[in-house]
Image (cartoon, helix red, strand yellow):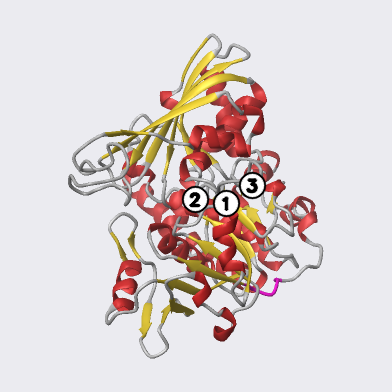
C-alpha cells in the first residue's frame, strides 16, 4: 500500500466516524439505546475514539472491523422502532459480515437479533440518585452519571451530601471535579451556583447539601423523592448504620461502595446481581478487588473447578495511608505510601465467597500497597480439579471476555507491552493479562489488572441501575 493510500484511508475513516457520531447521539438521547462496540461504550465518543475502538475488533474476533461495516447497521438501527436497551454493534457486525458480502439484508438481521428489544417499552421515569460523600469514588460516579445523562438514561444525579460548607468550599469541590491528577480533565462544563449551593455539570443541576450526619437531611425539601443514596464514605458498613439514610425523608434504598458487614448482600455485578430483590433496601457493591477477581474466578471454576488458591493483590496506595511517616492505627500503614511497598491484609479473597459461595474456604489472600496512585493487579495462584494448558486457558478466557454473560466485567489482553498506566480509565472490573498466564498440570496463575477507581465505579453504576429496576438488556444476548 502506498503512503498516500494510508492517508486517504484514514481520512475516509474520519468521514465515516463523523457520520456515525450524530447517529449514536440520536439513538441514545431520543430512544434510550446505548451503542457499544465489544463492550466499550460509544456514548459521547469523539470521532478519533470511534476509530480507535474499531481497531480493537481484531483482538476479539481475529479479524479487522471497519467503520464502513458498522455504519449500515447503525443507520438501520436508527430507523428502527426499538425500546431502551444496550446494543453491542461490534458483536452484531462481526456476526453479520461472517455470512454476508454486502449490506443487503441488514435490516432483517437486526430485527431478528433484537427481537427482544422491540417490546414497546419507553424510557422510564428517571430515578433520583444522591451521592453521600464526594471523595475519589464519589467524583468518578459523578462523572459517569453526568456522561450518561440524557433523555434516554433513567438515573438522575440530584444531589451530593458533604461535610463543611465554609467559604470557598463549593468552588474547591467543583475544581476537584474539573481536574483529576489520575483521570484527567472533566469532559464538559461545570458551573458553580453559589446562591443555590449547586453545581451545574453539562446541564445537570446537582444540589450540594451540607450535613454532618444523615438525619440532618430532608431530601424532599429539594424536590428529591424515593432516592437511592450511594454512601461513599465507608463510615457505616452495617445495616444499623446505613439505615440512618432510610430514616430521612425522600429516600428509598442505600448502596454502599465498600464491603458490607453482617447480613448485607455483597454484590459483584455480573456474578450474583440476581440475588438483588425488589424489596432489598441496603446493598453493598463489595470492594474493587473483589469485583476484579470474582468474575474471572467464576469463569475458571465453572470450567475447571477450583480446589484452592491464593490471591496476592498488588494495590495502588489509597487515601487511608499516610503520605509521609506518621501515626496510623493500622499495622505498617503509617509508613510513607509514596516511598514504600507496604505489606497489608485484604479481605477480598474471603469476600469472594459472599458472591460465589462455592469458593467458601478455598482462597487465602494478602495485599502489597505500592507507590502508584491508581491501577492495581491481582495474582491468582489456583489449584484446579483438572489439568490445563496455557493456550487452552487463554483461549477460554478470551472467549469469555468477548461473548459470555461476563463479557461486561472481564476484558482480555495479550500485549507484552501493557503496564499499569495503560489501564487507567478501563471500564471493566478486571483485565486478564494473557501474556503473563502460567499453566502447568492442574495449577494456573492468572494476572488480572484493574482500575481500582474507575473500573470499580462502573460496577457500582451497574448495581445502581439494577437496584432501581432500570437496568436495560444488552443485545445480542
Distance in Å between CA atoms under marks 1 and 2: 6 Å
Magenta-drawn segment:
123-127
Residue 352 position by quadrant = top right
Q: Which residue is mark 1?
A: 284
Q: Position of residue 80 (x, y in %)?
A: 73, 65
Q: Earlier in the sequence, mark 3 or mark 1?
A: 3
Residue 465 position in % (x across, y down):
63, 60
80 over 99 or under it: above or below: below
Label 3 vs label 1: CA separation?
10 Å
The tag on residue 263 is 3
Tell me the mark number nearer the camera, choosing from 3 and 1. Answer: 3
Q: Which residue appears farthest toward the bottom when viewing the image?
A: 195
**For the residues marked 3 and 2, what is the alpha-carbon distance in whole angstroms?**
14 Å
Quadrant of the rendered structure where residue 392 is?
Answer: top right
Is label 1 in contact with label 2 (beta carbons under 8 Å)? Answer: yes
> What residue sits right under mark 2 in the picture?
258
Amino acid at each position: 500500500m502506498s503512503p498516500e493510500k494510508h492517508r486517504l484511508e484514514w481520512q475516509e475513516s474520519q468521514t465515516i466516524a463523523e457520520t456515525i457520531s450524530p447517529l449514536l447521539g440520536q439513538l441514545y438521547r431520543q430512544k434510550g439505546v446505548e451503542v457499544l462496540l465489544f463492550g466499550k461504550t460509544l456514548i459521547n465518543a469523539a470521532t478519533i475514539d470511534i476509530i480507535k475502538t474499531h481497531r480493537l475488533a481484531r483482538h476479539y474476533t481475529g479479524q479487522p472491523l471497519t467503520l464502513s461495516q458498522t455504519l449500515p447497521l447503525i443507520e438501520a438501527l436508527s430507523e428502527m422502532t426499538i425500546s431502551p436497551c444496550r446494543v453491542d454493534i461490534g458483536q452484531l457486525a462481526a456476526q453479520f459480515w461472517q455470512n454476508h458480502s454486502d449490506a443487503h439484508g441488514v435490516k432483517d438481521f437486526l430485527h431478528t437479533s433484537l427481537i427482544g428489544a422491540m417490546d414497546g417499552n419507553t424510557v422510564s421515569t428517571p430515578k433520583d440518585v444522591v451521592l453521600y460523600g464526594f471523595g475519589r469514588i464519589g467524583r468518578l460516579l459523578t462523572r459517569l452519571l453526568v456522561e450518561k445523562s440524557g433523555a434516554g438514561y433513567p438515573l438522575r444525579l440530584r444531589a451530593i451530601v458533604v461535610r463543611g460548607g465554609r467559604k470557598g468550599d463549593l468552588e474547591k469541590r467543583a475544581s476537584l471535579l474539573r481536574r483529576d491528577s489520575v483521570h484527567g480533565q472533566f469532559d464538559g462544563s461545570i458551573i458553580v451556583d453559589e446562591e443555590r449551593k449547586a453545581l451545574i455539570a453539562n446541564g445537570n443541576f446537582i444540589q450540594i447539601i451540607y450535613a454532618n450526619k444523615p438525619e440532618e437531611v430532608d431530601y424532599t425539601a429539594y424536590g428529591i423523592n424515593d432516592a437511592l443514596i450511594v454512601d461513599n464514605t465507608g463510615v457505616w458498613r452495617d445495616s444499623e448504620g446505613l439505615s440512618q439514610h432510610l430514616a430521612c425523608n425522600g429516600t428509598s434504598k442505600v448502596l454502599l461502595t465498600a464491603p458490607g458487614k453482617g447480613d448485607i448482600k455483597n454484590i459483584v455485578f455480573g456474578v450474583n446481581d440476581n440475588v438483588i430483590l425488589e424489596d432489598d433496601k441496603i446493598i453493598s457493591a463489595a470492594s474493587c478487588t473483589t469485583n476484579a477477581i470474582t468474575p474471572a474466578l467464576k469463569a475458571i471454576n465453572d470450567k475447571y473447578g477450583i480446589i484452592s488458591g491464593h490471591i496476592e493483590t498488588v494495590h495502588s496506595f489509597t487515601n487511608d495511608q499516610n503520605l509521609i511517616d506518621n501515626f496510623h492505627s493500622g499495622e505498617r500503614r503509617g509508613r510513607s505510601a509514596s516511598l514504600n511497598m507496604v505489606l497489608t491484609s485484604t479481605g477480598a479473597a474471603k469476600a469472594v465467597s459472599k458472591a460465589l459461595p462455592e469458593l467458601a474456604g478455598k482462597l487465602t489472600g494478602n495485599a502489597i500497597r505500592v507507590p502508584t496512585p491508581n491501577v492495581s493487579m491481582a495474582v491468582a495462584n489456583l489449584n484446579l480439579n483438572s489439568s490445563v494448558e496455557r493456550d487452552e486457558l487463554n483461549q477460554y478466557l478470551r472467549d469469555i471476555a468477548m461473548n459470555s454473560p461476563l463479557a461486561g466485567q472481564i476484558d482480555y489482553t495479550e500485549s507484552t507491552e501493557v503496564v499499569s498506566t495503560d489501564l487507567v480509565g478501563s471500564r471493566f472490573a478486571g483485565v486478564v493479562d494473557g501474556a503473563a498466564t502460567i499453566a502447568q498440570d492442574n495449577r494456573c496463575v492468572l494476572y488480572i489488572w484493574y482500575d481500582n477507581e474507575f473500573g470499580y465505579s462502573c460496577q457500582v453504576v451497574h448495581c445502581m441501575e439494577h437496584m432501581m429496576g432500570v437496568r436495560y438488556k444488552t443485545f445480542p444476548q
